[in-house]
Image (tube, grey):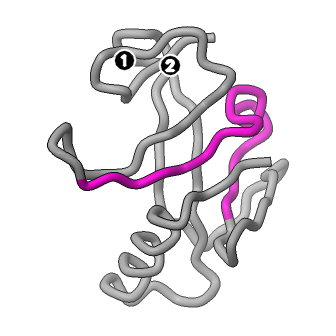
Amino acid sequence: MIYISDKARQRVLEILEEEHLGSDSFVRISVVGGGCSGLSYKLDFDNQMQANDQVFEDKGIKLVTDMKSMLYLYDTQLDFTEGLNGKGFHFNNPNASRTCACGESFSV
């Protein structure tokens, strides 16, 4: 399962409205190679399901990931902050053994 915090949920709803994305749109989360720790998160809005997509819904938000990324994202929470350290989405991933200082990449 992938989860979403209340703050991230609110920001996702704002973006969907601002960008005039339809009710069939969802958040696509994936893991790609790269970053100083080896793996990086990728977050997009999408409306096309792919073969082998894993679909989760939390707090009324549909979260979709591919099967390979799911191995790294199990029990991860998508969060959103507006603090002094930067504004944006970030991931609370219990599977990550190490993260870089900026929080944009990780390793397992």
Residue range of the region highlighted in magenta in the rendering: 63-82
Is-magenta flag for residue 69? Answer: yes
- List the residue tagged with mark 1: 35
Question: Left of 25 or right of it: where is 21?
Answer: left
Label pair 2/1, CB-CB below 8 angstroms: yes
Residue shown at 25%/55% (left/top)? 82
Residue shown at 67%/60% (left/top)? 63
Q: Amino acid at mark 1?
A: Gly
Question: Left of 23 or right of it: where is 10?
Answer: left
Q: In terms of secondary structure, where does tag 2 sit?
A: strand
Residue shown at 60%/89% (left/top)? 23
The Cα atoms of the two marked residues, 2 and 1, are separated by: 6 Å
Image quadrant in which the C terminus is located: top right
Q: Amino acid at mark 2?
A: Leu
Pointer 2: residues within 10 angstroms few (<14), some, or many (20+)? Answer: some
Residue shown at 72%/64% (left/top)? 49
The location of residue 32, given as percent across then percent down, is 52, 28
**As rendered, which of 42 and 49 lies closer to the eye?**
42
Task: Name above or below for residue 63 compared with residue 94.
Answer: below
Question: Left of 74 or right of it: where is 88?
Answer: left
The location of residue 28, given as percent across then percent down, is 58, 56
Pointer 1: residues within 10 angstroms few (<14), some, or many (20+)? Answer: some
Residue 66 disc label = none
Q: In terms of secondary structure, where does tag 1 sit?
A: loop
- List the residue tagged with mark 2: 39
